[in-house]
Structure formats: C-alpha cells, structure tokens
Amino acid sequence: MNFANNTSHMEGQSVSLRVSFTGSIIYVAVHIPIILMCVLGNALVMTTFIRFTKVRKVNNYNIFALSIADFLTGLVAVPLAVANRLIISETTCRAHSRPYLFLPSYVLCAISMCLLLAITIDRYIAISRPLRHHVIMTRQKTIIIIIFCVAFGFCYGKLSVWNFGSYPYKWMCERNLHDAPKLTIHLLAASFLIPTWLLLLIIAYVRIFYIAYLRKDDVTNSRSQRDKSVQWRMRMHTTISSAIVLGAFTICWLPNSFKYVLKIYLATDPKSLLAVQTFCEVLGYMNSFMNPIIYGWRNHQFRTAYKQILNDCGCFQGNKPDQNSASPDKDEPGSINLTRSMTSVNVNISE
C-alpha cells in the first residue's frame, strides 16, 4: 500500500495507513525503544525522589517535575503522535479531533521549557547569592513555580486546539486541502519561541558562569574556609549539570523550529514532509530519556539510588552493592557524600 493509494480513501469512513505496511512497522519500531526508555528511565528518577529523603532537596523539586513531564511524554504524547502520523481516519484528520492528539506533546514540551527556566533561575540565585539561596528559593516558592509552569504549558497547548474551533470538520491530513491562517501563526510563533527561549537560557548560563569566575577567588582552600570551598564546588557541579541538561534540550528540540518553517513554506511532497517530521520529532522525544542518564552520570546520589532500586528489583542479584554505602540516606542528616577524584569528605551544609 503506497501513499497515493492511501490518500484516495481519505474522505471516506475507512481507516488506512499513511505509508506502506512495512514503513509503518519501521516507524513504530523506531518509537518503541524511545517510549520504553522514557517511561522506565523517568520512573527511576521519580522513584529515587520519592524513596530517598536526601534526594528530596528543594533544588531537586524541579528535576522531579521535569521527570514527570518526560514520563508522560513517553507514556501519552509519543503513542498519540505516532498514531496521528500513521493513521488516516476521521478522528486523526478532522480539525475537531486531530489537534487534541498532539495536545500532550505541545503541553509537555512547554512545561519542560518553563521548568528549564525555573532551574536556570535557581542556579543563578545559588551562584550569585549563595548565602541567601536557601532563603529565597524555599520549598513553597519552588512548588508555586512548578504550578505556574504546568499552567503555562496547558495555556500554550490550548492554542493548538483553539485554532480550529471555527472549522471543526476541516480535513487536515493533506496540505492542499486546508488553509488555516491561525495554524500558520501558531506554527510561526512556535518556530521563533523555541530558539528565542533557548537563547535567553544560554545567555543566562553564560552570565552564571561569568559570576562564578569572578567569585572563584573569594573561595579559598585554607583550612578555615574548607567547608565554604566544598559547598561552592558542589554548587558549581550542580550548575554544570543543569547546563548539560539545557544543552541536550537545545540539540534535541531546536530542529523542530526548522520543521515548522519547512512545513509552512517549503515541503510539498508528503513523503518528504513525513521524513522531516519523523526525524525532528524522534530527536525531540529522545531528550525525554536523556535527563535520567545525565542525572546518573553527574550526580552521585542519583547514581547510588539507581543502583539500589535496580538491586531491589532483582536487576543486580549477582552484584549486590554494599548495604552500608549504597543508600543515599545512610549519611548523617544534613551531610552530603562527595566521591569525586578527590578523597571522600562529609560536609555539613544548611541547605
């Protein structure tokens, strides 16, 4: 079944595939590993946050919220988007229903972008005002910011549904069969929103590292300043990890901006358009399982918690970690175990 044969049945009630059966199998097979890694990886992050009290620090609340968004991306957004791309039917092609199938993708992407902004602000305060960070970014304020990010995501996602309220039965599966000016405005806004938003966040991190460079001389390695020095290294390590998360998001989602422009002005061949959409969307969805990998790579507590959770699930039965050192909660309250290239030390901190 080729594309031409499929489109000949679009106006009917039958359900058909946008590409050949073999192509559909390949398309689904590409997305299944992404779905599994998004769900399982972010479930591991959420379990770590809920189970281990030492991980439930204020600055990790945003990470927890981001993991929920990525988890829902794999569980809800990706399967709906796959069905919407492959299946041609009244449900997937009419204006009154098609935007709702893409709604989770729009909402969750907007929530992730807003949470990245929240993480950036948290890191800026931690570096520029280290002594007042725990006073400014309290648990209550962090929760309020997360609620705002969720509300922002729903408001942005709602725009894609509102666009077609006046044309509920317009056919949308073939580019030359619909002309929605509001859709064009929405896609153009999205194509400029993502790179502009990311550019602002990158500028913010440049400013953060510049402040850190100016302040590095204020933190000495003398015995009397050792605690302060270790705390500063920890803040910088967390900031670098956050910058890596932002970098991964930028690499994965920036091509979607070009996808929108191509969809509006350049793409005329449906197969070429599908290929571009698939590449950009797969790249964007891959970002949802990268974050758990980054946390385990950069954060000792997350890495240790991962090992213990997987061990409890029976994944490491032949290589059980030492129970006295494996748990992130084994250290004394208020202390953080630093295991880097330097010797391990326990430092009491107030945050």
Image (spheres, rainbow, N blue to C red):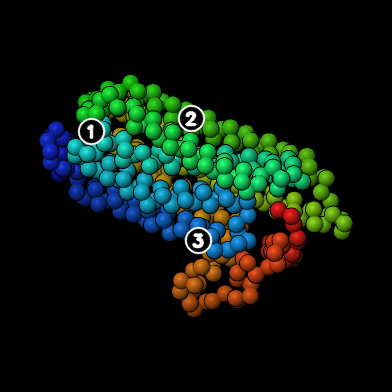
Camera-side mark, 1 or 2: 1
**Please, what is the three-letter code of the amino acid marked with disc 3?**
Thr
**Residue 3 in the image: above or below residue 234:** above
Q: Residue at x 23, y 35 (%)?
A: 93
Residue 108's x, y, as percent?
43, 42
Secondary structure of the residue carrying numbered label 2: helix
Where does label 3 land, which residue? 47
Task: Indicate which disc, 1 or 3, sits on the residue closer to the N terminus.
Answer: 3
Give residue 193's mark: 2
- Quarter of the figure with residue 95: top left
Secondary structure of the residue carrying numbered label 3: helix
Give residue 94's mark: 1
Task: Indicate which disc, 2 or 3, sits on the residue closer to the N terminus.
Answer: 3
Residue 161's x, y, as percent?
34, 32
**Please, what is the three-letter code of the amino acid marked with disc 2?**
Leu
Give the residue at the far front of this rendering: 140
**Residue 136 in the image: above or below residue 270:** below
Few, some or many residues within 10 Å of mark 3 (<14, 14–19, 20+)? some
Residue 18's x, y, as percent?
21, 41
